[in-house]
Amino acid sequence: MTPINPDQLLDALNWRYATKAFDPNKKIPADTWSALEESLVLTPSSFGLQPWKFLVITDKPLRESLVPHAWSQRQIADCSHLVVMLAKKTVGEPDIDKLIHRMVEVRGGTADALAAYKGMMMGSLAQAPPEFIVDWAKKQTYIALGQFMGAAAALGIDTCPMEGFVASKFDEILGLNSADYTTAVLCPAGYRSADDKYATLPKVRYQAEDVIEHR
Amino acid sequence: MTPINPDQLLDALNWRYATKAFDPNKKIPADTWSALEESLVLTPSSFGLQPWKFLVITDKPLRESLVPHAWSQRQIADCSHLVVMLAKKTVGEPDIDKLIHRMVEVRGGTADALAAYKGMMMGSLAQAPPEFIVDWAKKQTYIALGQFMGAAAALGIDTCPMEGFVASKFDEILGLNSADYTTAVLCPAGYRSADDKYATLPKVRYQAEDVIEHR
């Protein structure tokens, strides 16, 4: 693995901004999008449980139908690819067994050899109240969100993280009402419009000394 | 901004793993660490409110004192730089005014011109119950976590995300009990030990078709 240099990283993160207007005519090329989907798959999660799904929505009418339930923000419809990040609402023994099974499939060995790992996950999650689980799963989707936005910036792709939406309406329109998942957070991706005046505004961050403390 | 190529991104994300054993003798060079701190500062957050602080702990005795409260995981003490991500426990008008002030400082204009933006933040957050706020702030720190781990991997730095710790003990030892912040998540960073057998195990992820759905 050849590391990039620190300046290249900071260039990408400084270039990134919460894109307010996407160019609706520009689509992300297939190979670039495929790498970004792979980056979602590779997202780290607690215990490796991956308590999520990522809906990638390109269908225009479906996206238009979501706009009113996302504070009418046009990024939903105008971006190239809309990623709807879903969090799992429950985590029980079947989910934990599914991971154990996948570990054995990928790494070899036996499920029995992973009994202690299973016990640790059962102890942490299987008895936790439902509100804790969905909340924990949503946090995991925010890891995906953070890594995805950074990865996209590194590839020259614009994104806009969005918490401003009505989750119950999204769940209804996306047919999740009887599913194990709920809408956690949104991330439209694509290319900034030449008209987006936010693209050139200086980034607003607190000074490093206000948010970083050395001990 | 010169984008990196998709293969370089995937190489870095595949190289990354949750490092179980750090080499305690290897320290991250100052220029690399400085870029990683800057990446933390640049993390996107909801409304741009940055409801966080990042403690960067290099003091060895302090780290050793935290180990027992993090399931005795040695990464806490053996990594090069331990990042403790803190979430703000409350968000009220003073926090919102502080952001407005910073926006004016960085971009010019007046606070009055940002009244609608302030109103939106007040409506979303200032009346929300305390449990909602701390939880929302913790989610924001997970964006930082996701971006930080990706950025570190791109620079050839190992990390290990950690949720397994006793937050009340961390808060106590770090002197946060009367502070506005609480420990949300940990991320040791440094270099993998040559002995870490986890470094060469195949990565366990579900198949793309199990976690990504196209609509």
Image (cartoon, coloured by chain):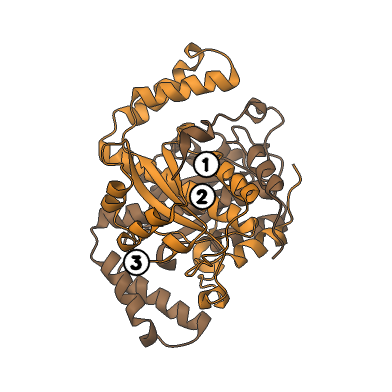
Chain colours: A orange, B brown
The residue that disc 2 covers is B145
What amino acid does circle 1 point to? Pro
On screen, residue B76 versus residue B171, left or right, reads right
Q: Nearer the viewer, mark 3 or mark 1?
A: 3
Residue depicted at 50% across the width and 86% down the height: B108
The residue that disc 1 covers is B161
The residue that disc 3 covers is A72
Q: Quadrant of residue B203?
A: top right
In the rendered structure, which disc, 2 or 1, sits on the residue that comes first in sequence?
2
Q: Secondary structure at mark 3?
A: loop
Q: Secondary structure at mark 1?
A: loop
Front one among A174 and B179: A174
Distance from Cα at disc 3 to Cα at disc 1: 35 Å
Residue depicted at 63% across the width and 50% down the height: A32
On screen, residue A130 versus residue A85, left or right, reads left
What amino acid does circle 2 point to? Leu
Asked if badges 3 and 1 are on one and the same chain, I answer no
What amino acid does circle 3 point to? Ser
Callout 2–callout 1 Cβ contact below 8 Å: yes
